[in-house]
Image: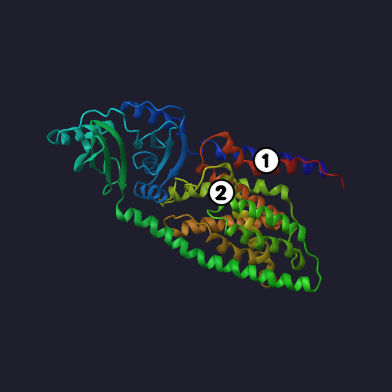
Amino acid sequence: MNRFHYVLGVVVAAAAAVGAVALIRGRGVTGEAEAAAVARAAMERLGYAPLGEPDATFEGDQELAWALERASAGPAGAALARGEGGAVRWRLVFPAGGEAQVTVDGVVWSLRRPVPAEPGPDLFPSLAKARVEAAIAQTVPDPSRWRLVRAQSWREGAHTWERAWFVGGAGPLPPGWRRELELEMVGSSVVSWRRFVHPLGTDLGVVTGRMAELRLLRRPALLGLAIVVIGVLIAGAEAVAYRESTAVVRGLVYGAVVATAGSFAADTLASAPVQAVVLAAVVALLPAWTDLPPTRLSWGPAAGVGLAAATLAGHAAILGAGGWVPVTSPVPAGTGWERQLADAWLPALVEEPLLRGALPAFAAPLLGWWGAALLAAPIGALLHPEPAVPLLASIGLEVVLQLGLAVVARFAGVGGAVLARGTCEALVQRASFPVGWTWDRVALLGVALGTVLLLWPRRRD
Protein backbone atom coordinates (compact mmCIF):
# COMPACT_ATOMS: atom_id res chain seq x y z
CA MET A 1 0.00 0.00 0.00
CA ASN A 2 2.85 2.40 0.84
CA ARG A 3 4.44 1.74 -2.55
CA PHE A 4 1.15 2.44 -4.30
CA HIS A 5 0.75 5.72 -2.40
CA TYR A 6 4.30 6.74 -3.29
CA VAL A 7 3.79 5.97 -6.98
CA LEU A 8 0.54 7.93 -6.88
CA GLY A 9 2.39 10.83 -5.27
CA VAL A 10 5.01 10.77 -8.03
CA VAL A 11 2.31 10.84 -10.70
CA VAL A 12 0.43 13.69 -8.99
CA ALA A 13 3.64 15.69 -8.47
CA ALA A 14 4.64 15.29 -12.12
CA ALA A 15 1.17 16.22 -13.36
CA ALA A 16 1.05 19.28 -11.08
CA ALA A 17 4.50 20.46 -12.20
CA VAL A 18 3.67 20.04 -15.90
CA GLY A 19 0.31 21.75 -15.45
CA ALA A 20 1.79 24.67 -13.51
CA VAL A 21 4.52 25.28 -16.11
CA ALA A 22 1.88 25.19 -18.85
CA LEU A 23 -0.24 27.75 -16.98
CA ILE A 24 2.55 30.31 -16.62
CA ARG A 25 4.24 29.71 -19.95
CA GLY A 26 4.13 32.84 -22.09
CA ARG A 27 2.35 34.84 -19.39
CA GLY A 28 3.71 38.04 -17.90
CA VAL A 29 4.36 41.63 -18.89
CA THR A 30 6.70 41.85 -21.88
CA GLY A 31 8.49 44.67 -23.63
CA GLU A 32 11.02 45.86 -21.03
CA ALA A 33 14.10 45.42 -23.23
CA GLU A 34 12.28 46.69 -26.31
CA ALA A 35 11.03 49.74 -24.41
CA ALA A 36 14.58 50.79 -23.55
CA ALA A 37 15.63 50.51 -27.21
CA VAL A 38 12.57 52.44 -28.40
CA ALA A 39 13.12 55.23 -25.86
CA ARG A 40 16.80 55.50 -26.77
CA ALA A 41 15.99 55.74 -30.48
CA ALA A 42 13.33 58.41 -29.85
CA MET A 43 15.79 60.55 -27.92
CA GLU A 44 18.44 60.12 -30.57
CA ARG A 45 15.99 61.48 -33.14
CA LEU A 46 15.89 64.63 -31.02
CA GLY A 47 19.68 64.88 -31.10
CA TYR A 48 20.34 63.45 -27.64
CA ALA A 49 22.14 60.14 -27.02
CA PRO A 50 21.31 58.87 -23.49
CA LEU A 51 24.09 57.11 -21.62
CA GLY A 52 23.88 53.96 -19.53
CA GLU A 53 21.12 51.43 -19.03
CA PRO A 54 17.84 52.88 -17.77
CA ASP A 55 15.99 51.90 -14.64
CA ALA A 56 12.66 50.38 -15.73
CA THR A 57 9.46 50.46 -13.70
CA PHE A 58 6.17 48.87 -14.76
CA GLU A 59 3.13 51.07 -14.24
CA GLY A 60 -0.36 51.40 -15.59
CA ASP A 61 -3.87 52.76 -15.40
CA GLN A 62 -5.94 49.73 -14.46
CA GLU A 63 -9.36 51.33 -14.96
CA LEU A 64 -8.35 52.73 -18.36
CA ALA A 65 -7.08 49.31 -19.48
CA TRP A 66 -10.33 47.61 -18.48
CA ALA A 67 -12.42 50.38 -20.09
CA LEU A 68 -10.57 49.79 -23.37
CA GLU A 69 -11.27 46.08 -23.13
CA ARG A 70 -14.90 46.76 -22.30
CA ALA A 71 -15.25 49.05 -25.34
CA SER A 72 -13.38 46.68 -27.70
CA ALA A 73 -14.08 43.20 -26.41
CA GLY A 74 -11.58 40.42 -26.79
CA PRO A 75 -7.98 40.63 -28.01
CA ALA A 76 -8.58 44.00 -29.71
CA GLY A 77 -9.18 45.76 -26.39
CA ALA A 78 -6.17 44.13 -24.77
CA ALA A 79 -4.00 45.18 -27.75
CA LEU A 80 -5.20 48.78 -27.40
CA ALA A 81 -4.44 48.75 -23.67
CA ARG A 82 -0.91 47.58 -24.44
CA GLY A 83 -0.36 50.03 -27.32
CA GLU A 84 -2.27 53.09 -28.55
CA GLY A 85 -4.41 53.19 -25.43
CA GLY A 86 -1.35 53.70 -23.24
CA ALA A 87 -2.84 51.92 -20.24
CA VAL A 88 0.17 49.72 -19.36
CA ARG A 89 3.63 51.21 -19.74
CA TRP A 90 7.26 51.02 -18.80
CA ARG A 91 8.81 54.11 -17.21
CA LEU A 92 12.48 54.42 -18.12
CA VAL A 93 14.91 56.76 -16.37
CA PHE A 94 18.41 57.05 -17.84
CA PRO A 95 21.23 57.63 -15.32
CA ALA A 96 22.80 60.54 -17.21
CA GLY A 97 19.48 62.30 -17.88
CA GLY A 98 16.38 61.62 -19.91
CA GLU A 99 13.10 59.95 -19.02
CA ALA A 100 10.45 58.21 -21.10
CA GLN A 101 7.27 56.18 -20.86
CA VAL A 102 6.87 53.44 -23.46
CA THR A 103 3.83 51.20 -23.70
CA VAL A 104 4.22 47.45 -23.44
CA ASP A 105 3.83 47.19 -27.22
CA GLY A 106 6.46 49.86 -27.94
CA VAL A 107 4.57 53.17 -28.37
CA VAL A 108 6.44 56.15 -26.91
CA TRP A 109 3.89 57.67 -24.55
CA SER A 110 5.93 60.47 -23.05
CA LEU A 111 9.52 61.65 -23.30
CA ARG A 112 11.71 64.30 -21.76
CA ARG A 113 15.31 64.92 -22.69
CA PRO A 114 17.71 67.31 -20.94
CA VAL A 115 17.57 70.87 -22.24
CA PRO A 116 20.35 71.15 -24.85
CA ALA A 117 23.15 73.64 -24.28
CA GLU A 118 22.51 75.03 -27.77
CA PRO A 119 18.78 74.62 -28.50
CA GLY A 120 18.93 76.66 -31.68
CA PRO A 121 17.52 80.09 -32.48
CA ASP A 122 14.23 81.21 -31.05
CA LEU A 123 11.28 80.95 -33.41
CA PHE A 124 9.84 84.11 -34.90
CA PRO A 125 6.19 84.53 -33.90
CA SER A 126 5.08 84.33 -37.53
CA LEU A 127 6.90 81.01 -38.00
CA ALA A 128 6.29 79.43 -34.59
CA LYS A 129 2.92 77.84 -35.41
CA ALA A 130 4.17 76.13 -38.57
CA ARG A 131 7.33 74.92 -36.81
CA VAL A 132 5.38 73.53 -33.88
CA GLU A 133 2.92 71.75 -36.19
CA ALA A 134 5.83 70.22 -38.10
CA ALA A 135 7.47 69.05 -34.85
CA ILE A 136 4.64 66.62 -34.09
CA ALA A 137 6.02 64.31 -36.78
CA GLN A 138 8.86 63.58 -34.34
CA THR A 139 6.44 62.26 -31.72
CA VAL A 140 3.63 60.22 -33.33
CA PRO A 141 3.49 57.79 -36.28
CA ASP A 142 0.34 59.41 -37.76
CA PRO A 143 0.97 63.20 -37.65
CA SER A 144 -1.66 63.94 -40.31
CA ARG A 145 -4.41 62.84 -37.88
CA TRP A 146 -3.44 65.47 -35.28
CA ARG A 147 -4.37 69.15 -35.30
CA LEU A 148 -3.07 72.04 -33.25
CA VAL A 149 -5.70 73.54 -30.93
CA ARG A 150 -3.73 75.82 -28.64
CA ALA A 151 -0.20 77.13 -28.16
CA GLN A 152 1.64 79.48 -25.82
CA SER A 153 5.09 81.05 -25.65
CA TRP A 154 7.11 82.42 -22.77
CA ARG A 155 10.60 83.67 -22.14
CA GLU A 156 12.78 81.75 -19.72
CA GLY A 157 16.49 82.46 -19.38
CA ALA A 158 18.08 83.21 -22.72
CA HIS A 159 15.52 81.32 -24.84
CA THR A 160 11.86 81.30 -25.80
CA TRP A 161 9.80 78.23 -24.89
CA GLU A 162 6.82 76.94 -26.86
CA ARG A 163 4.09 74.69 -25.53
CA ALA A 164 1.41 73.31 -27.83
CA TRP A 165 -1.64 71.08 -27.44
CA PHE A 166 -2.84 68.76 -30.21
CA VAL A 167 -6.01 66.70 -30.60
CA GLY A 168 -5.92 63.49 -32.59
CA GLY A 169 -9.54 62.30 -32.48
CA ALA A 170 -10.24 58.64 -31.75
CA GLY A 171 -7.72 57.23 -34.24
CA PRO A 172 -7.45 53.49 -33.56
CA LEU A 173 -9.33 53.84 -30.26
CA PRO A 174 -13.04 53.01 -29.88
CA PRO A 175 -15.50 55.60 -31.27
CA GLY A 176 -16.13 58.47 -28.89
CA TRP A 177 -12.67 58.36 -27.33
CA ARG A 178 -10.20 61.23 -27.79
CA ARG A 179 -6.42 61.51 -27.98
CA GLU A 180 -4.41 64.55 -26.92
CA LEU A 181 -0.73 65.45 -26.97
CA GLU A 182 1.23 68.17 -25.22
CA LEU A 183 4.55 69.19 -26.79
CA GLU A 184 7.29 71.50 -25.51
CA MET A 185 10.10 73.17 -27.43
CA VAL A 186 12.94 75.41 -26.34
CA GLY A 187 14.42 77.53 -29.08
CA SER A 188 14.13 75.32 -32.17
CA SER A 189 14.46 71.97 -30.33
CA VAL A 190 11.78 69.59 -29.08
CA VAL A 191 12.53 68.66 -25.48
CA SER A 192 9.40 66.79 -24.32
CA TRP A 193 5.95 65.51 -25.15
CA ARG A 194 3.18 63.68 -23.36
CA ARG A 195 0.19 61.81 -24.72
CA PHE A 196 -3.24 61.52 -23.08
CA VAL A 197 -6.34 59.41 -23.69
CA HIS A 198 -9.82 60.60 -22.76
CA PRO A 199 -12.26 57.66 -22.68
CA LEU A 200 -15.92 57.73 -23.54
CA GLY A 201 -17.83 58.26 -20.32
CA THR A 202 -20.07 55.22 -20.71
CA ASP A 203 -17.14 52.84 -21.28
CA LEU A 204 -15.23 54.07 -18.25
CA GLY A 205 -18.44 54.31 -16.25
CA VAL A 206 -19.23 50.62 -16.65
CA VAL A 207 -15.84 49.67 -15.23
CA THR A 208 -15.69 52.20 -12.42
CA GLY A 209 -19.29 51.51 -11.50
CA ARG A 210 -18.70 47.79 -11.35
CA MET A 211 -15.59 48.29 -9.20
CA ALA A 212 -17.60 50.53 -6.85
CA GLU A 213 -20.29 47.85 -6.61
CA LEU A 214 -17.70 45.24 -5.70
CA ARG A 215 -16.22 47.47 -3.01
CA LEU A 216 -19.72 47.85 -1.58
CA LEU A 217 -20.34 44.10 -1.72
CA ARG A 218 -17.14 43.45 0.21
CA ARG A 219 -18.56 45.11 3.30
CA PRO A 220 -20.97 42.33 4.33
CA ALA A 221 -18.23 39.77 3.67
CA LEU A 222 -15.81 41.66 5.90
CA LEU A 223 -18.54 41.94 8.53
CA GLY A 224 -19.02 38.18 8.36
CA LEU A 225 -15.30 37.62 8.92
CA ALA A 226 -15.31 40.07 11.82
CA ILE A 227 -18.14 38.14 13.48
CA VAL A 228 -16.19 34.91 13.02
CA VAL A 229 -13.09 36.45 14.61
CA ILE A 230 -15.09 37.66 17.59
CA GLY A 231 -16.60 34.19 17.99
CA VAL A 232 -13.14 32.60 17.85
CA LEU A 233 -11.82 34.87 20.57
CA ILE A 234 -14.82 34.23 22.83
CA ALA A 235 -14.61 30.47 22.32
CA GLY A 236 -10.86 30.60 22.82
CA ALA A 237 -11.22 32.48 26.10
CA GLU A 238 -13.64 29.82 27.30
CA ALA A 239 -11.20 27.09 26.27
CA VAL A 240 -8.36 28.76 28.14
CA ALA A 241 -10.57 29.18 31.21
CA TYR A 242 -11.27 25.45 31.19
CA ARG A 243 -7.56 24.72 30.52
CA GLU A 244 -8.13 22.93 27.26
CA SER A 245 -5.22 22.29 24.93
CA THR A 246 -4.06 25.10 22.63
CA ALA A 247 -1.33 25.48 20.01
CA VAL A 248 0.37 28.63 21.22
CA VAL A 249 3.70 28.03 19.48
CA ARG A 250 2.00 27.23 16.17
CA GLY A 251 -0.09 30.38 16.50
CA LEU A 252 2.93 32.58 17.19
CA VAL A 253 4.81 31.18 14.20
CA TYR A 254 1.80 31.62 11.96
CA GLY A 255 1.30 35.18 13.17
CA ALA A 256 4.93 36.00 12.39
CA VAL A 257 4.51 34.66 8.85
CA VAL A 258 1.34 36.72 8.34
CA ALA A 259 3.04 39.86 9.68
CA THR A 260 6.00 39.39 7.35
CA ALA A 261 3.81 38.81 4.29
CA GLY A 262 1.52 41.72 5.21
CA SER A 263 4.44 44.12 5.54
CA PHE A 264 5.32 43.53 1.88
CA ALA A 265 1.81 43.29 0.45
CA ALA A 266 0.07 46.20 2.17
CA ASP A 267 0.51 49.80 1.07
CA THR A 268 1.03 50.69 4.71
CA LEU A 269 2.25 48.59 7.60
CA ALA A 270 -0.79 49.38 9.77
CA SER A 271 -2.89 46.36 8.84
CA ALA A 272 -0.10 43.77 9.02
CA PRO A 273 0.22 43.68 12.86
CA VAL A 274 -3.56 43.52 13.30
CA GLN A 275 -3.86 40.62 10.87
CA ALA A 276 -0.93 38.87 12.53
CA VAL A 277 -2.43 39.12 16.01
CA VAL A 278 -5.87 37.93 14.87
CA LEU A 279 -4.52 34.97 12.89
CA ALA A 280 -2.11 34.00 15.66
CA ALA A 281 -5.05 33.81 18.05
CA VAL A 282 -7.21 31.89 15.58
CA VAL A 283 -4.56 29.26 14.81
CA ALA A 284 -3.59 28.90 18.46
CA LEU A 285 -7.16 28.47 19.71
CA LEU A 286 -8.74 26.34 16.96
CA PRO A 287 -7.53 22.97 18.36
CA ALA A 288 -9.13 23.78 21.72
CA TRP A 289 -12.75 23.69 20.55
CA THR A 290 -12.92 22.27 17.04
CA ASP A 291 -12.72 18.86 15.42
CA LEU A 292 -11.21 19.65 12.00
CA PRO A 293 -10.16 17.16 9.33
CA PRO A 294 -6.51 16.09 9.60
CA THR A 295 -4.03 18.18 7.63
CA ARG A 296 -2.39 16.62 4.57
CA LEU A 297 -0.15 19.39 3.27
CA SER A 298 1.29 17.36 0.41
CA TRP A 299 -1.95 17.38 -1.59
CA GLY A 300 -2.65 21.10 -1.24
CA PRO A 301 -0.36 22.51 -3.97
CA ALA A 302 -1.51 19.93 -6.53
CA ALA A 303 -5.11 20.93 -5.83
CA GLY A 304 -4.07 24.57 -6.21
CA VAL A 305 -2.83 23.89 -9.74
CA GLY A 306 -6.21 22.41 -10.63
CA LEU A 307 -8.04 25.38 -9.13
CA ALA A 308 -5.83 27.82 -11.07
CA ALA A 309 -6.56 25.97 -14.31
CA ALA A 310 -10.29 26.08 -13.55
CA THR A 311 -10.11 29.83 -12.80
CA LEU A 312 -8.35 30.69 -16.06
CA ALA A 313 -10.70 28.40 -17.98
CA GLY A 314 -13.63 30.18 -16.35
CA HIS A 315 -12.34 33.54 -17.58
CA ALA A 316 -12.10 32.16 -21.10
CA ALA A 317 -15.61 30.67 -20.84
CA ILE A 318 -17.11 34.05 -19.80
CA LEU A 319 -15.48 35.76 -22.78
CA GLY A 320 -16.53 32.96 -25.11
CA ALA A 321 -20.13 33.22 -23.96
CA GLY A 322 -20.28 36.91 -24.87
CA GLY A 323 -19.65 38.32 -21.39
CA TRP A 324 -16.77 40.49 -20.34
CA VAL A 325 -14.01 39.83 -17.86
CA PRO A 326 -10.69 41.72 -17.76
CA VAL A 327 -7.96 40.27 -19.95
CA THR A 328 -5.30 42.67 -18.69
CA SER A 329 -4.24 41.59 -15.22
CA PRO A 330 -4.50 44.03 -12.32
CA VAL A 331 -1.46 46.31 -12.22
CA PRO A 332 0.50 45.59 -9.02
CA ALA A 333 1.55 48.42 -6.71
CA GLY A 334 5.16 47.21 -6.94
CA THR A 335 7.08 44.76 -9.08
CA GLY A 336 9.54 43.27 -6.62
CA TRP A 337 9.55 39.51 -6.10
CA GLU A 338 8.66 40.17 -2.46
CA ARG A 339 5.47 41.94 -3.54
CA GLN A 340 4.62 39.12 -5.96
CA LEU A 341 5.07 36.51 -3.23
CA ALA A 342 3.11 38.46 -0.61
CA ASP A 343 0.23 39.39 -2.92
CA ALA A 344 -0.25 35.74 -3.84
CA TRP A 345 0.02 34.16 -0.42
CA LEU A 346 -1.38 36.73 2.01
CA PRO A 347 -5.06 36.11 1.09
CA ALA A 348 -4.51 32.39 1.67
CA LEU A 349 -2.76 32.93 5.00
CA VAL A 350 -5.42 35.33 6.30
CA GLU A 351 -8.69 34.01 4.91
CA GLU A 352 -8.39 30.22 4.81
CA PRO A 353 -8.07 29.61 8.57
CA LEU A 354 -11.24 31.68 9.01
CA LEU A 355 -13.30 30.40 6.09
CA ARG A 356 -12.16 26.77 6.18
CA GLY A 357 -11.43 26.48 9.91
CA ALA A 358 -13.29 28.80 12.23
CA LEU A 359 -16.52 29.29 10.27
CA PRO A 360 -17.16 25.55 9.68
CA ALA A 361 -16.39 24.93 13.34
CA PHE A 362 -19.17 27.32 14.33
CA ALA A 363 -21.70 26.29 11.70
CA ALA A 364 -21.07 22.54 11.42
CA PRO A 365 -23.10 21.57 14.54
CA LEU A 366 -26.17 23.17 12.93
CA LEU A 367 -25.55 22.82 9.19
CA GLY A 368 -23.07 19.96 8.90
CA TRP A 369 -19.71 20.23 7.17
CA TRP A 370 -20.98 20.83 3.67
CA GLY A 371 -23.64 23.23 4.87
CA ALA A 372 -20.90 25.24 6.58
CA ALA A 373 -18.85 25.15 3.39
CA LEU A 374 -21.82 26.54 1.43
CA LEU A 375 -22.09 29.31 4.00
CA ALA A 376 -18.41 30.21 3.68
CA ALA A 377 -18.40 30.16 -0.14
CA PRO A 378 -20.37 33.39 -0.76
CA ILE A 379 -18.41 35.22 1.94
CA GLY A 380 -15.12 34.29 0.30
CA ALA A 381 -16.52 35.01 -3.17
CA LEU A 382 -17.40 38.60 -2.28
CA LEU A 383 -13.90 39.39 -1.03
CA HIS A 384 -12.05 39.24 -4.38
CA PRO A 385 -14.39 39.16 -7.41
CA GLU A 386 -13.28 40.76 -10.67
CA PRO A 387 -15.39 43.43 -12.42
CA ALA A 388 -17.04 41.15 -14.95
CA VAL A 389 -20.19 41.76 -16.97
CA PRO A 390 -22.57 40.28 -15.97
CA LEU A 391 -21.62 40.54 -12.30
CA LEU A 392 -23.10 37.11 -11.51
CA ALA A 393 -20.52 35.54 -13.83
CA SER A 394 -17.64 36.83 -11.73
CA ILE A 395 -19.27 35.98 -8.41
CA GLY A 396 -20.28 32.55 -9.70
CA LEU A 397 -16.71 31.80 -10.73
CA GLU A 398 -15.45 32.83 -7.30
CA VAL A 399 -18.08 30.65 -5.62
CA VAL A 400 -16.84 27.66 -7.62
CA LEU A 401 -13.27 28.43 -6.46
CA GLN A 402 -14.44 28.67 -2.84
CA LEU A 403 -16.30 25.35 -3.06
CA GLY A 404 -13.16 23.78 -4.52
CA LEU A 405 -11.20 25.04 -1.53
CA ALA A 406 -13.86 23.59 0.77
CA VAL A 407 -13.34 20.18 -0.85
CA VAL A 408 -9.59 20.54 -0.35
CA ALA A 409 -10.11 21.47 3.31
CA ARG A 410 -12.40 18.50 3.82
CA PHE A 411 -9.80 15.99 2.64
CA ALA A 412 -6.52 17.86 3.31
CA GLY A 413 -7.37 20.05 6.28
CA VAL A 414 -6.99 23.79 6.73
CA GLY A 415 -3.25 23.62 6.03
CA GLY A 416 -3.89 21.92 2.71
CA ALA A 417 -6.43 24.63 1.83
CA VAL A 418 -3.88 27.34 2.63
CA LEU A 419 -1.33 25.76 0.29
CA ALA A 420 -3.95 25.21 -2.41
CA ARG A 421 -5.17 28.81 -2.26
CA GLY A 422 -1.64 30.27 -2.24
CA THR A 423 -0.54 28.11 -5.16
CA CYS A 424 -3.67 29.01 -7.13
CA GLU A 425 -3.28 32.76 -6.51
CA ALA A 426 0.41 32.68 -7.44
CA LEU A 427 -0.28 30.99 -10.77
CA VAL A 428 -3.24 33.24 -11.64
CA GLN A 429 -1.42 36.44 -10.68
CA ARG A 430 1.72 35.50 -12.62
CA ALA A 431 0.51 37.55 -15.60
CA SER A 432 0.64 40.77 -13.54
CA PHE A 433 4.43 40.71 -13.28
CA PRO A 434 7.23 40.96 -15.86
CA VAL A 435 8.35 37.97 -17.87
CA GLY A 436 11.45 36.17 -16.67
CA TRP A 437 12.56 33.14 -14.73
CA THR A 438 12.85 35.13 -11.49
CA TRP A 439 9.11 35.75 -11.49
CA ASP A 440 8.35 32.21 -12.68
CA ARG A 441 10.17 30.77 -9.68
CA VAL A 442 8.02 32.77 -7.27
CA ALA A 443 4.85 31.58 -9.04
CA LEU A 444 6.03 27.96 -8.87
CA LEU A 445 7.09 28.07 -5.21
CA GLY A 446 3.96 26.31 -3.98
CA VAL A 447 4.27 23.63 -6.67
CA ALA A 448 7.89 23.04 -5.69
CA LEU A 449 6.89 22.68 -2.03
CA GLY A 450 4.14 20.25 -2.96
CA THR A 451 6.57 18.18 -5.03
CA VAL A 452 8.95 17.89 -2.08
CA LEU A 453 6.13 16.90 0.28
CA LEU A 454 4.75 14.29 -2.12
CA LEU A 455 8.13 12.72 -2.86
CA TRP A 456 9.55 12.86 0.66
CA PRO A 457 10.15 9.28 1.82
CA ARG A 458 7.63 8.21 4.48
CA ARG A 459 8.20 5.77 7.28
CA ARG A 460 6.63 2.38 6.69
CA ASP A 461 3.72 1.45 8.90
Relative horizontal placement of residue 11, taking residue 218 as reference (left or right): right
Q: Position of residue 175 (x, y in %)?
A: 27, 47
Q: CA distance from mark 2 to mark 1?
A: 20 Å
Q: Position of residue 357 (x, y in %)?
A: 68, 62
Mark drawn on residue 448: 1
Relative horizontal placement of residue 405, taking residue 147 as reference (left or right): right
| Number of other residues with Cα within 10 Å of mark 2, as a class: few under 14, some 14 to 19, many 20 or more | some
Mark drawn on residue 310: 2
The kind of secondary structure element at disc 1 is helix
Please, which colouring scheme is shown? Answer: rainbow
- Residue 147 sits in which quadrant? top left
Residue at 39 percent across and 60 percent down: it is 209
Q: Amino acid at mark 1?
A: Ala
Relative horizontal placement of residue 101, taking residue 265 as reference (left or right): left
Of 400 and 168, nearer the camera is: 168
Relative horizontal placement of residue 5, taking residue 187 as reference (left or right): right
Mark drawn on residue 165: none
- Residue 430 sits in which quadrant? top right
Quarter of the picture holding the N terminus: top right
Q: Position of residue 254 (x, y in %)?
A: 70, 55
| Number of other residues with Cα within 10 Å of mark 1, as a class: few under 14, some 14 to 19, many 20 or more | some
Asked if 260 appears above or below 234 in the picture, the reply is: above
Q: Position of residue 237 (x, y in %)?
A: 73, 72
Of 232 and 312, nearer the camera is: 232
Residue 125 is at least partly visible in this image: yes
Q: Amino acid at mark 2?
A: Ala
Residue at 61 percent across and 70 percent down: it is 227
Q: Earlier in the sequence, mark 2 or mark 1?
A: 2
The kind of secondary structure element at disc 2 is helix
- Farthest residue, direction front: 157
